[in-house]
Image: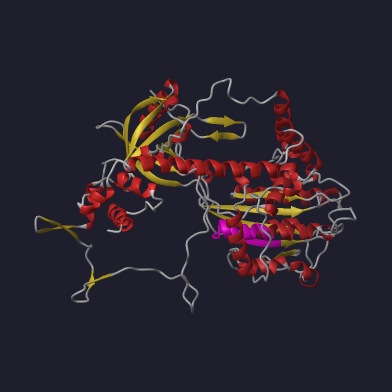
Amino acid sequence: MDLDPEGIFRDDSDEDEDNVQEREANKEMVVYLVDASPKMFTPATTQDNEKQDTHFHTIVSCITESLKTQIIGRSYDEVAICFLNTKEKKNLQDSAGVYVYNVGDREELDRPTAKLIKDFSSIEDSFMSTIGSRYGITSGSRENTLYNALWVAQALLRKGSVKTVSKRILIFTNEDDPFGTITGAVKTDMIRTTVQRAKDAQDLGLSIELLPLSRPDEQFDMSLFYADLIGLDGDEITEYLPSAGVRLEDMTNQLRKRIMKKRRVKTLSFAITNDVCIEVNTYALVRPTTPGTITWLDSLSNLPLKAERSFICNDTGALLQDAQTRFQMYNDTIVKFSVHELSEVKRVASHHLRLLGFKPLDCLKDYHNLRPSTFIYPSDQRIFGSTCVFVALHSSMLRLGRFALAFYGNPTRPQLVALVAQEEVTSSGGQFEPPGMHMIYLPYSDDIRYPEEVHVTYDDAPRATDEQIKKASNLFKRIDLKNFSACQFANPALQRHYGILEALALGEDEMPDIKDETLPDEEGLSRPGVVKAIEEFKTSVYGENYDQEEAEAAAGKASRGDASKKRKEITDAAAQISAAYDWAELADNGKLKQMTAAELKSYLTAHDLPVSGKKEVLVSRILTHLGK
């Protein structure tokens, strides 16, 4: 019987050689193909009250921000910036109208560096004098600069296998019909050869993407040419333009953050019974982003230093090569332990995961989930048949509504975990949530707090009126955060850290402005509609003549009075306990040390003396007060 007929638990390692190109690439190589025709240097907007930025300026800013993010997120990626429709030419093929900016002849692609970003961000000042702009495809000429640019981009991406490298060509332009100035057979032939060049590149594993820019007087029309170039048809053409605009905006305004791939963390052995053990892989779906560890550099070469630790014999000064040996005194005998023996002593389980039993899902509470869970998925790499056993367990847990209770034998932190089965969720775009299990780390008994419960009868409990509920609902609608996403929420401390590094690397005198999104939106809260909603809610709750400062002062006074009253009650209770003893006689007979700390503190509290310290300190303090 096939337990997994749909193949939903098929791992990436089980792929055939024909589908190996579909694996997630470890590295990315990108060629930015920027149109430099005169149309790109026209104003991007017709409004007079806005700064007249050109489309070329927009693309330069976009690529600059993308390079900055690549340095932080994936510094090992490689990029090339290539201009088409230029007066000057610079490329290995010596093709007209194509200028490769940052890669020399017969050189590999460049990694994003501070020098590249600094030079490219100021390219507009010298572009016309050093590179120049012209119309590449004109009537009466057989020159096809777009064909040449695709050929050059394909040559730049010749290194690296598509099995491990993702290769992309990003085209930036505001010209939706590059062959619009020519007609007849010449136009048909040039379109055919250009589209064929793009298809040849895609057949080699290269991805071609278009990021179009619409001119102020007309909308970019994908159907004229570029739909055929990148292979779009039907509804894909109408949906592509809005999605491309979003991608372009994301490239310009993307957060500085480390890009973490959903990589396998470790492989665990999962003991179902004493005789059945399977293999599972663990994946960290959520990881905290930190500034990173400190890297020590050599003062002369500026290269990272490698730290090494050596053990030297205290008697002879010789370098110890063998594993360090530790010892423990037992019955006047030295018992020596090797590092391996110590690790075996600390081992609390022979398997990483051991199944203990099952419980209903309603036994798992929300407060049990104290930290991000780990996702587990079966693997047949070392233990064949693990997927079959895992699928049977997964299906039964979903059908019966149970979660598995297991022991996680981590030597440093052994604890119980809950394994919750997750069913596969798919949509029209593909898999939305994968099948597998979430390993939730259950809390220890000390992690659970039991706050004091205040039982209030129904008659004593305050109830909001319909008017108060209406005003509160109106206030929520006014201050609702639209388009908020926790995935795109900027950590101000990390943004400031990356901003300082960026300013130092680029030699900038001022640190870029960092918007702290954790602070209240004072501008938004001061809008007339929001202010009115807040005042109406306050009036419905506190009344019209409510003065917040007077209320806070009265509350503070009442709180101080309650604290004073409570202290007096504690002092009176301690005085009653202290009065039951003859402290002078106890001191003379040396019996104070036989009393408990609570009894000693009652005397100190009754006489307004400090109660901190150990028992010896308390006795000394009482003797001093008695004059002994």
Is any atom of residue 381 visible in this view? no
From the viewer's perspective, tell me whether residue 175 is left or right of residue 561.
right
User: Considering only vertical position in the picture, is 357 above or below 584?
Assistant: above
Q: Is residue 72 magenta?
A: yes
Q: Name the residue: 23% across, 63% down.
A: 324
Q: State the residue in front, 204 or 574.
A: 574
Q: Is residue 86 magenta?
A: no
For the view shown, which residue lies furthest in the bottom direction? 300
Quadrant of residue 534 in the image?
Answer: top right
Q: Looking at the rendering, in which quadrant would you find the C terminus?
A: bottom left
Find residue 89 and report its horizontal and vertical position in percent: 73, 68
From the viewer's perspective, tell me whether residue 181 is left or right of residue 79.
right
Find residue 457 and report its horizontal and vertical position in percent: 54, 21
From the viewer's perspective, tell me whether residue 47 is left or right of residue 402.
right
Q: Which residues are magenta?
A: 64-82
Quadrant of residue 504 in the image?
Answer: bottom right
Q: State the residue in front, 406 or 555.
A: 555
Q: Name the residue: 60% across, 44% down.
A: 557
User: Considering only vertical position in the picture, is 312 above or below 393?
Assistant: below
Is any atom of residue 298 visible in this view? yes
Applied colour scheme: secondary structure
Find residue 521 and report its horizontal and vertical position in percent: 71, 47
Q: Name the residue: 45% across, 25% down.
A: 362
